[in-house]
């Protein structure tokens, strides 16, 4: 099977399903697994793929994500007679379903089932611990920042928010009407979340931004954390580890 993946997390999933040698095209943002993606041709970015080159490659299927990729590119490939397999999971359960779907599409249902069941088992374990924590002391509130200039967060209708909610978190901007709202430091200070999580992607937050926000909000620096955006926003074979990581981000090491 000839496969093109236009989403980094789906590229990683293809490799983990044992089909890395079937990939004929990936994006320049597909970086995992680091020791193997270099052997696959890059066909542009997630938002600006080289549609003509993808058509030339003659893939049996192109894997896309509705948030990462543009509808017009998928439509152009469909018009050229190329099969598109899309996805848009927003939580762990949706990711397990997505993995099973791609297992069927790529004709490796058994390998996909192993990953899907791992997602479900880890989600159940984390949810059970979260329920006990919330019952004894309430949820741990958080704000998750993804961008600077302007400051941007995310609402409840997003994958990172749902992963953290599974672990017993409560998003301070959950009810915002925009999925990725622009916020001010004054709004962040007024929300007063227990934890302010600065993601390493898409904006590469570092410790200097903790100092900046600590001064602007008046929060102590210990309320802020730099968190791995790949584990909290990549959906697929990274999700099992991401579920555990979300728990650690909020509460420290998981309960034994």
Image (spheres, rainbow, N blue to C red):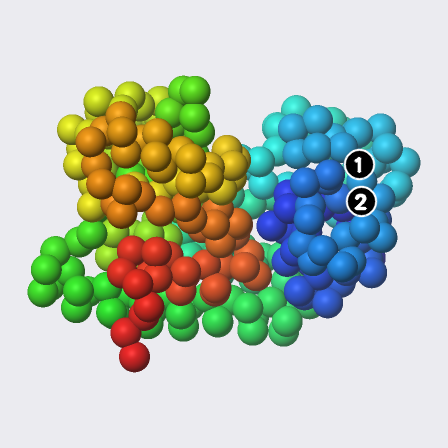
Identify which residue, 86 or 170, lies in the foreground: 170
Quadrant holding the C terminus: bottom left
State the mark number for residue 183. none
Total marks placed: 2
Q: Residue furthest bottom?
A: 256
Q: Position of residue 251 (x, y in %)?
A: 27, 60
User: Hey, which quadrant is residue 142 in on the image?
Assistant: top left
Quadrant holding the N terminus: bottom right
Q: Position of residue 21 (x, y in %)?
A: 82, 60
Query: Regarding mark 1 in the picture, which secondary structure is present there?
Result: loop
The residue depicted at 23 percent of the width and 64 percent of the height is: 130
Do labels 1 and 2 touch, CB within 8 Å? yes
Q: Position of residue 214 (x, y in %)?
A: 28, 34
| In the displayed structure image, the side of residue 77 where residue 185 appears, left or right | left
Residue 179 in sight here: no
The residue depicted at 48 percent of the width and 71 percent of the height is: 118
State the mark number for residue 43. 1
State the mark number for residue 25. 2
| In the displayed structure image, the side of residue 91 where residue 74 appears, left or right | right
| In the displayed structure image, the side of residue 56 where residue 179 appears, left or right | left
Task: Tell me the CA gap for discs 1 and 2.
Answer: 6 Å
Q: Position of residue 221 (x, y in %)?
A: 28, 42
Please tell me whether residue 89 is drawn above or below residue 152 in the rendered image. below
Label 1, residues with CA under 10 Å away: few <14, some 14-19, many ≥20: many
Query: Regarding mark 2 in the picture, which secondary structure is present there?
Result: strand
Q: Earlier in the sequence, mark 1 or mark 2?
A: 2
The residue depicted at 20 percent of the width and 31 percent of the height is: 218
Please tell me whether residue 9 is drawn above or below residue 245 in the rendered image. above
Label 2, residues with CA under 10 Å away: few <14, some 14-19, many ≥20: many
Identify which residue, 144 or 27, lies in the foreground: 144
């Amino acid at each position: 099977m000839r496969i093109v993946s236009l989403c980094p997390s789906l590229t990683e999933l293809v490799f983990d399903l044992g089909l890395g040698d079937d990939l004929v095209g990936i994006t320049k943002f597909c970086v995992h697994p680091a020791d193997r993606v270099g052997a696959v041709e890059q066909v542009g970015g997630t938002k600006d793929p080289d549609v003509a080159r993808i058509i030339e490659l003659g893939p049996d299927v192109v894997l896309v994500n509705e948030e990462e990729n543009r509808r017009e590119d998928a439509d152009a490939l469909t018009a050229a007679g190329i099969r598109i397999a899309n996805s848009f999971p927003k939580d762990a359960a949706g990711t397990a379903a997505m993995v099973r779907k791609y297992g069927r599409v790529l004709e490796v249902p058994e390998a996909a089932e192993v990953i899907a069941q791992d997602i479900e088992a880890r989600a159940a374990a984390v949810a059970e611990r979260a329920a006990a924590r919330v019952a004894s002391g309430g949820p741990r509130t958080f704000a998750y920042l993804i961008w600077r200039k302007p400051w941007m967060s995310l609402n409840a209708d997003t994958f990172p928010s749902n992963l953290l909610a599974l672990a017993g978190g409560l998003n301070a901007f959950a009810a915002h009407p925009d999925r990725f709202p622009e916020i001010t430091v004054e709004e962040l200070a007024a929300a007063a979340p227990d934890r302010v999580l600065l993601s390493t992607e898409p904006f590469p937050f570092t410790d200097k931004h903790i100092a900046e926000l600590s001064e602007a909000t008046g929060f102590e620096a210990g309320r802020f954390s730099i968190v791995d955006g790949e584990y909290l926003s990549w959906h697929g074979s990274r999700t099992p580890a991401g579920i555990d990581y979300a728990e650690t981000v909020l509460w420290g090491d998981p309960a034994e």
